[in-house]
Structures are given as C-alpha cells and as structure tokens.
Image: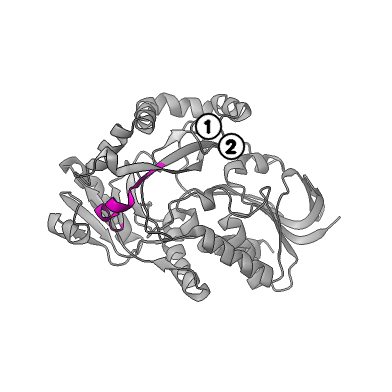
Amino acid sequence: MPRYDVVIVGGGIIGLAAAREILTRQPGTSLAVVDKEPAIGEHQTGHNSGVIHSGIYYAPGSLKARLCTAGARLMYEFCESHGVKADPCGKLIVATAEEELPALDELYRRGTANGVSGLEMVGPAGIAEREPHCTGIRAIWSPTTGIVDFSQVALAIADDVTRLGGVILTGRLVTGLTVRTGSIAIVTSRGELTATRVLTCAGLGSDRVARLSGAPAEPRIVPFRGDYWQLRPERRHLAQNLIYPVPDPKFPFLGVHFTRRIADDAVWLGPNAVLALAREGYRRWDVRAGDVAGTLGYPGFRRMARRYWRTGLAEVYRDFSKRAFVAACQRFIPELVPADVVPGPSGVRAQSVARDGQLVDDFSFNVQGRQLMHVRNAPSPAATSCLAIATMIADEWDRAG
C-alpha cells in the first residue's frame, strides 16, 4: 500500500497549486495528487472564461478580497516566469441606467479598499475610448484585470509539482477517507493509499468527498450551468477586451459579459446561471437522477428556490431564447443582432448553498484536526486566487505542526 506524507484529492488548479506550494516549502515531502479524471483540470479549471480578476467585487476583509488581489499579482508573476501567455488587457464595468450608479460607486469603494490599483471612473467618452461599440452612462475601468488560459497555467503548475518530486495519479475516484491514529486511509477505485495529511479540493464533488471523512454535510454543492455564445469572427471587433455589467449584489454571479479569449481572440458572451441537472452536466439535457434528487431533496436548495424563483425563471428563459440573451447583451453593444452570435461552450459552477438557503459568498474551508483539510467553496475567482489560496493552506498546515 503506497504511503505518502501528503495526499491531495482533486487535480484542479487549486489542488495543484497547493501541491506546488507544499513541495516548495518542504523539499523531500512525499506527495501525491489524486484525481478521478484521466487528465488534470477537467472541470472548473478547464471550463471557465479565463479572466484574471482584480479583486474589485468582494467585500473588504473577506477571503475572496484578500486572496484574489494577492492571487492576481502572483498569477501574473507565475505566467511571466513560466512562459504562459497572460494579457492585462483591462476591463470595463458598465452602468447603463441611473439606478445602477450606487452599486457602481460601491464597487469602486470596494476595489479601492481591497488595494486594486489603477481604478478609474469614466463617463461615456472614456467608455468609447476603450470600447468604441459599447454604450453606458458611467463605468469603472480596471486596468489590472486580464486574460489567460487557466488550463495552460494548470499544466505549468503540474510540471512544477512533478519536478519537485510529487506524483499525479489520474483515473482514481476516491470512495473512502478513514482517519486513523497518525494516518489517513484513502480508498480509490484503483486501490488504497495512506497519508499523514490529506487536503481535498474536489470542486463539484467537494461536499461528497468531505463527508467521506465525517466532515459536516453542509454546506452542499448546488451546480449551476453557465452557457456561452460567441461572436462570429467577422464581428469580434464589437468587443475588444472585457465588458461587464454592474452585478446584482444578491448573487455571487457577475452577470452576462463579453470576454476576449487569449488563445484565439474569440469573444465569449455569457454566462447565464441555470440549475444544472447533473454536477458535471455541460449540456442542457445532461441529467443524472442521483444529482437531481440530491439537489431537490436538500432543504437549502428549496429555500433558495423559493426566494429567487423569479430570477431563476428569467435565467432559464434567456438560456433557451437566443433573442432574449442577445437583448441582454444589447444593453452594452446596441448594434449587436442575433445573427452575430453562434453557440459556444458551457461550464458548471460548484456553488455551496447553506441549509438556510443562502448562497455561500466567500471561499470556505473546513479543518479537521492536524491531518485533514477540505476546500468547501471555491468558485470564481478561485482560479485567479489559486496561488494565494495555496499559500494560505500551507500557512495553516505550518501552524498546525
């Protein structure tokens, strides 16, 4: 039975970053990253829009605020040192109606409090200067927001992990975590491992993996699918970089936006946020009965649904109606027409929901003694923040001894 000092469950960008940080601090540590998929970064890491967030959105003092701001800086440094292309192209957060201005002002206040550099409030002329086809009455210009391919980042981090002596074990579904005196048994679909310490970063399955060790059953993951459209190549000039709406403060989603992709200069429009009928359901009709039953049977989901059912229905309508989706985008690019867009990819967000129906807004971690730690809620901006999250995890374990 293979034995390691550390086993990390989950080969997404957070698990890989944590492995790299631990091996960098403690050379000679025997460490394995275990993932159920045949390759690393198959889910949230490989299905996001590729934005390096600046930290403007998050409540000052929150983990998201601290770790995103620090993580963005570390991400740019990592990309430069590892030859991964990253572009600090900047972003406009655009208000199109007077009633959005107080929320825009609050975002500016938050960003300033969080130490986001270079923020500037601009009017219609400043909007047109940066995005000639975009209209709005006021906007925040965030020059440190950028784009990157997080799959390439994950591969570069994984190379560091193996170079530092770690191993990456794919195709191994974890089905058991048993805490023993001085060790933890990790049961997988391809045999058992033992470790002195275990970190779980299981994303869409984070609540289920945590429960294997007797960790609290809640908060639970409720999966939200986000579908994207894309501008036709001949219409990509309509959005040169990143155009975002003023988000609804009730939700941890940022709303439908325009995102230039770094690999091919494609422009994605979206995502929306609709309930996924499978935790890894990237298509509308992907259904897994057990996942649906688990979601519908959870009191936290039912309370959330009662509170936000109107918003949910509007999201579903926009998901199935191209015309309605384009209408939401025309607030920012009036000359956009349905013929300008074609279907794009989808992603699924692992969103923790508390039993009272509240969406868990901040990053969330669960520590079980000195041996076991679970990442329980790490949606966006987790990819941006991954290197800072890894530092925090390693700090926590250093303190635990």
Q: Position of residue 19 (x, y in %)?
A: 64, 63
- Secondary element under disc 1, as helix, strand or loop, is loop
Quadrant into which the C terminus falls: bottom right
Instruction: Please state if 220 lies on the left or on the right of 236 as rendered.
Output: right
Q: Report the disc number at residue 218.
A: 2
Q: Amino acid at mark 2?
A: Glu
The reply to whether the magenta stretch includes residue 258 is no
Q: Amino acid at mark 1?
A: Arg
Question: Residue sitting at 46 percent across and 74 percent down?
Answer: 80
In the picture, residue 338 is in which quadrant?
Answer: top left
Tell me the element at label 2.
loop
Q: Are marks 2 and 1 in contact (CB under 8 Å)?
A: yes
Position in image of residue 314 (x %, y %): 34, 29
Is 239 inside the magenta-drawn segment? yes
Residue 37 sits above or below residue 276 on the image: below
Residue 242, x across and y down, in percent: 31, 55
Closer to the chain start, of discs 2 and 1, is 2
How many numbered markers are drawn?
2
In the orientation shown, which residue stands out farthest toward the right?
1
Q: Which mark is residue 355?
A: 1
For residue 39, what is the image quadrant?
bottom right
CA gap between label 2 and label 1 equals: 7 Å
Quarter of the image where the N terminus is located: bottom right
- Can residue 36 be seen here? The reply is yes
From the viewer's perspective, is residue 101 above or below residue 384? above
Q: How dense is the environment of label 2, judged by Cα within 10 Å: few (below 14), some, or many (20 and up)?
A: some
Which contiguous range is marked in magenta? 228-241
